[in-house]
Structure formats: C-alpha cells, structure tokens
C-alpha cells in the first residue's frame, strides 16, 4: 500500500472469528482501515453465504462481527450497508445504532434496499441525528449530488457505479472537465489492463468497459456486439479507434 496512500480494505463474511482474523491480516499488510460489507445484495453473498446484506436481517450476528473486528485491530473499522432488506424492513437506523455501540467509527449508506438491487433511483434519508458519521452512496455523479447529501447531514459521498465508463467523474465533481476525446482514455485504460492482467485475460474482461464507455453514443449497440466477438488486443484497439474517430 506504500504507493497508494490511505487505502482501506473491505471484508465480508458471517463468521466473527474469521472476520477478525482477516482484519488482522489486512492491518498487518498495511490497510489504514477495515470496512465490513453489510450491503452486498447478490445471492452468492447475501443468501448463500449469509453475509453482506444478510447482516441487515440479523443484527445480533452483525453486532458480534463488528465487535470482533473492532477488538482485533488498532485501525478504524467502518461498515457499508443499505436502507434495509426490503420496503417492509427499512431498519438501517437500528443497524447504525448497533454499529455505534460496537465501536464502529463511521458507516456508508446506500440509498436502496437489498430487494431493489440497483434498480430505481437511490433515495437517501436525512442522517443529521445519526450517532456516527455517515457517507452517502447511490447515484452520486455530480457536485450538486454531493452538496445535496451534505445538506442531509452526510459527512461525505462515495462514488460507485457512476465511475463505470466515466473514470473522470471524480475530477468533474471537484470542478474538472470531461475529457475532449474519450477514445484516448479508453485506449489508455485498455493498455493498463493488458499490462496488469495480460492480453488473454484483459481483452475479454475489457468488453464490459468498452460497453460502459460507449453507452448512449450513436451506434453503440453495434459497437458492443462487435467488441464482444474480439479476442485480439490489436483488433480491439482498431475497433476503439474507429468508433471514437481516432486517427
């Protein structure tokens, strides 16, 4: 982590002792804080593993995990969660109270229930009376979004899926400009992926990124169909150059 700055590490699971062990290992590896995932909605985590968003349904287990992790490390511990399991169980305030009692330093709140997955707009509640600082998450894409959640009592904002196909969004939120030629960014991203993963893994993995970058542009559907059939890095680069008009 020496070149990365203040990097936290997120863990998920349903065994308090194992979670504590994982936190210790990450602390010893240089993590500056530990985040416990209590909001992941996907079935393999939330239902089959009884972790992630499942912990919103079992506050006693959540409390045991939080206390175990907090007691295992000397660095701050946070949690990331959602409004609740579904519309009938929007009990995020109760879980935040458990977190505060367990020694958790702050929380990130996603403005949807587990049942919503990522569908529909995120609706973030007022948290000005929360016992610990809360960071807003969900549909945060502009400086105006950040200002809005600050007015609701949030201590910060987390950008998630808004960065998919728009990695410059953090710069824009801070007053920067959208790049003039997105294609150059796409090519640079592809080069980084190849350098890190190797061509065999990077090219098929990059197809989804190409789709995100091209979303909403003319002929993007045809472009996505084309890149989904490409397995060679040079061919993919040509397709990207053609689509964005890079000479």
Image (tube, rainbow, N blue to C red):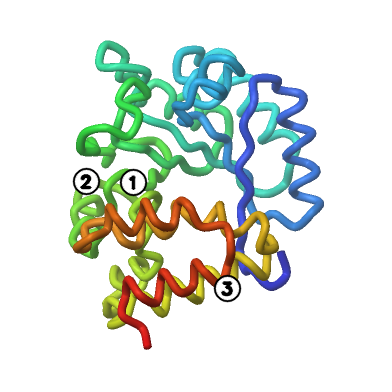
Label 3: element kind: helix
Residue 191: which disc?
Answer: 3
Label 1 CA crowd tier, 10 Å (few <14, some 14–19, many 20+)? many
Label 3 CA crowd tier, 10 Å (few <14, some 14–19, many 20+)? some
Quarter of the image where the N terminus is located: bottom right
Image x and y of residue 168, in percent = 37, 70
The part of the image, by quadrant, that contains residue 142 is: bottom left
Label 2: element kind: loop
| Up/down of 75 relative to 243, above or below | above
* Left or right of 175 in this view: 39: right
Image x and y of residue 186, in percent = 43, 71
Residue 86: which disc?
Answer: none
Question: Which of label 1 and label 2 is nearer to you?
Answer: 1
Residue position for label 1? 136
* Left or right of 122 in this view: 13: right
Mark 2 or mark 3, earlier in chain: 2
Label 2 CA crowd tier, 10 Å (few <14, some 14–19, many 20+)? some
Residue at 36% x, 83% y is 246
Mark 1 or mark 2, earlier in chain: 1
| Up/down of 5 relative to 228, above or below | below
Question: Which of label 3 and label 1 is nearer to you?
Answer: 3
The part of the image, by quadrant, that contains residue 244 is: bottom left
Residue position for label 2? 152
* Left or right of 78 in this view: 238: left
Residue at 49% x, 32% y is 100
Residue at 72% x, 46% y is 74
Mark 3 or mark 1, earlier in chain: 1
Q: Quick check: marks 2 and 3 in contact, CB under 8 Å?
A: no
Q: Quick check: marks 1 and 2 in contact, CB under 8 Å?
A: yes
* Left or right of 244 in this view: 237: right
Q: Quick check: marks 3 and 1 in contact, CB under 8 Å?
A: no
Marks 2/3: CA–CA distance? 41 Å
């Amino acid at each position: 982590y020496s070149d990365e700055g203040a990097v936290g590490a997120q863990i998920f699971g349903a065994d308090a002792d194992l979670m504590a062990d994982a936190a210790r290992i990450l602390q010893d590896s240089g993590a500056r804080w530990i985040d416990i995932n209590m909001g992941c909605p996907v079935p393999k985590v939330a239902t089959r593993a009884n972790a992630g968003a499942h912990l919103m349904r079992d506050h006693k287990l959540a409390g045991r995990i939080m206390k175990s992790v907090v007691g295992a490390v000397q660095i701050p511990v946070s949690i990331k969660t959602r409004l609740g399991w579904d519309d009938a169980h929007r009990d995020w305030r109760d879980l935040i109270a458990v977190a505060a009692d367990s020694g958790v330093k702050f929380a990130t709140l996603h403005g949807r229930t587990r049942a919503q997955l990522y569908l529909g707009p995120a609706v973030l509640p007022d948290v000005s009376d929360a016992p610990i600082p809360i960071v807003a998450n969900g549909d945060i894409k502009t400086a105006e979004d950040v200002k809005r959640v600050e007015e609701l009592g949030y201590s910060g904002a987390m950008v998630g899926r808004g960065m998919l196909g728009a990695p410059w969004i953090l710069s824009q939120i801070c007053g920067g400009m959208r790049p003039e030629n997105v294609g150059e960014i796409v090519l640079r991203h592809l080069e980084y992926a190849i350098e890190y993963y190797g061509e065999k893994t990077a090219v098929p993995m990059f197809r989804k990124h190409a789709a995100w970058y091209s979303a909403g542009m003319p002929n993007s559907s045809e472009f996505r169909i084309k890149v989904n059939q490409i397995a060679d890095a040079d061919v993919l680069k040509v397709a990207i150059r053609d689509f964005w008009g890079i000479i």
